[in-house]
């Protein structure tokens, strides 16, 4: 096995035993990036000199007696998280050249843990997309089939993990943007409960929905990364002041007696039969381990898509108003007056999908329409949350598909926004309810990965990790690799 093929926990054991050094491990991954990323295009920018410096520092810390599961581990960071001294563009021309003067809280935590930052990964512009085709800096390709999308918006991070161009990565999840690309790329992707991880330094899209998540080669790696970044942060008013459990201790292959709910609305008409077959086969695996599979209903699921596409654009309209061409970021150079600066900077700085969502959100918030659209969407959001509350009264966790189909071809849906939005139909409701969820691979459809999700109640990441880990240990889908 090549060093770049290691999982985080495998590499951590070798580093702990001094069988390898962080410098050796980091060089191996950087060489892998150099050999493959011209095809995958997972990274917007790499920081090799900084990575090797971080690796040397990690080796010195270990030589001095320090230890830790992420000490010396090379990771990739989605380009919506502020990184001091490293350009952060959110996949947008309007932030081209912007170098943050501070680190996001999650980056501070990773640095304290001794991680090695390899670079910043591609994303749909301001995370608005499901395919990483909306980036202003080019399209990322799925390592399983370079003609297909890796999912979005954390497509760069997911593709980097799947292609062994990092050992793990951070992404963000507003409506499925960690879990959906994880499914398309055949890896594990975890969205924590809203409030479990600080959003300070995360460039905002929809503030009541955004959450930093983890992507790894298996469930254990997602748990290790979550352990490092979770916890209260006084800089984030939405951060929960709750103790952080030992997530790795939750990883035991035992689900006997657990009740796993299957909402019938998620296995309805429109799902690819290959996806449905893979998910039902997974349910049989859990049943064989002693779990009780419970048929349930979540009747407001059908409203999740329209509710999400009213609330998230409305919040985006407010959040993106700060990009005015004055304070930082792109400013149109031939403007005639201050109003021309505003208009032309946004016209040339934002891409078409971002403009579409800003206009949708501004309309939904406008006088005369606020009550009819935004306020009503918030009321239906409450009903969706109540569906989840009732489900967890009956079940320990819920099992649903991650996507209705495997990865689609690049360009296939780019001119049909509704069809693009429908690729997230199984992920959106979890963000509206604020709960936690993890996507894990559960099969292949004509050589393309299929994923399923384990949903959990608020701050119950331990349960979803346990359920996902039990399935993972009973199968080998997480060991399958793309041929790139």
Image: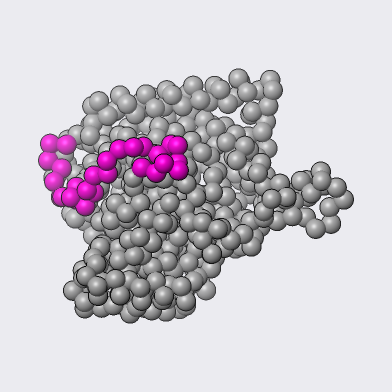
**Residue 253 is inside the magenta segment:** yes
**Total label count?**
0
Q: Is residue 41 above or below residue 95?
A: below
Where is residue 392? Give x, y as percent: 27, 29
Q: Quadrant of residue 388?
A: top left
Taking the spot 51% from the left edge, 38% from the top edge, the residue there is: 207
Range of magenta residues: 232-258
Q: Is residue 392 above or below residue 134?
A: above
Locate the C terminus and report the quarter of the image it occupies.
bottom left
**333 relative to 64 in the view: left or right:** right
The residue most toward the front is 64
Along the line of sight, the residue nearer the viewer: 109 or 46: 109
Q: Is residue 300 above or below residue 125?
A: above
Q: Quadrant of residue 188?
A: bottom left
Taking the spot 59% from the left edge, 52% from the top edge, the residue there is: 125
Where is residue 259? Give x, y as percent: 19, 34
Q: Tell me if residue 324 can be seen.
A: yes
């Amino acid at each position: 096995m090549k060093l770049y093929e290691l999982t985080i926990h495998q590499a951590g054991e070798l580093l702990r035993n001094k069988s390898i050094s962080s410098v050796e491990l980091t060089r191996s991954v950087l060489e892998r990036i150099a050999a493959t990323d011209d095809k995958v295009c997972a990274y917007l920018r790499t920081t090799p000199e900084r990575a090797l410096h971080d690796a040397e520092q990690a080796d010195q810390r270990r030589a001095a007696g320090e230890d830790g599961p992420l000490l010396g581990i090379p990771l990739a960071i989605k380009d919506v998280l502020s990184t001091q001294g490293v350009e952060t563009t959110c996949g947008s021309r309007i932030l081209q050249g912007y170098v943050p003067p501070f680190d996001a809280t999650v980056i501070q935590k990773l640095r304290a843990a001794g991680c090695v930052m390899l670079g910043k990964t591609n994303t749909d512009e301001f995370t608005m997309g499901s395919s990483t085709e909306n980036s202003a800096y080019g399209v990322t390709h799925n390592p399983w089939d370079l003609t297909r999308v890796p999912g979005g918006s954390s497509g760069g991070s997911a593709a980097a993990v799947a292609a062994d161009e990092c050992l793990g990565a951070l992404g963000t999840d507003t409506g499925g943007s960690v879990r959906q690309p994880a499914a398309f790329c055949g890896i594990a992707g975890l969205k924590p409960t809203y409030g479990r991880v600080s959003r300070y330094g995360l460039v905002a899209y929809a503030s009541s929905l955004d959450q930093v998540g983890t992507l790894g080669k298996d469930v254990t790696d997602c748990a290790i990364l979550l352990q490092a970044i979770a916890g209260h942060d006084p800089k984030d008013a939405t951060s929960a002041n709750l103790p952080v459990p030992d997530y790795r201790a939750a990883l035991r292959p035992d689900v006997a007696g657990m009740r796993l709910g299957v909402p019938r609305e998620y296995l309805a008409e429109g799902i690819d039969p290959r996806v449905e077959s893979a998910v039902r086969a997974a349910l049989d695996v859990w049943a064989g381990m002693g779990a009780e599979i419970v048929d349930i209903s979540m009747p407001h699921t059908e409203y999740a898509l329209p509710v999400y596409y009213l609330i998230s654009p409305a919040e985006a309209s407010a959040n993106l108003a700060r990009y005015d061409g004055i304070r930082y970021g792109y400013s149109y150079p031939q403007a005639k007056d201050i109003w021309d600066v505003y208009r032309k900077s946004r016209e040339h700085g934002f891409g078409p999908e971002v403009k579409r969502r800003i206009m949708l959100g501004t309309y939904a918030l406008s006088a005369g329409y606020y009550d009819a659209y935004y306020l009503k969407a918030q009321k239906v959001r409450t009903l969706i949350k109540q569906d989840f509350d009732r489900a967890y009264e009956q079940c320990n966790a819920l099992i649903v598909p991650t996507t209705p189909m495997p990865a689609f071809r690049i360009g296939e849906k780019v001119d049909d926004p509704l069809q693009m939005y429908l690729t997230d139909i199984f992920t959106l409701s979890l963000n509206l309810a604020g709960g936690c969820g993890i996507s894990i691979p559960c099969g292949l459809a004509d050589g393309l990965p299929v994923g399923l999700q384990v949903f959990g109640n608020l701050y119950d990441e331990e349960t979803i990790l346990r359920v996902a880990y039990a399935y993972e240990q009973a199968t080998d889908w997480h060991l399958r690799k793309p041929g790139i």
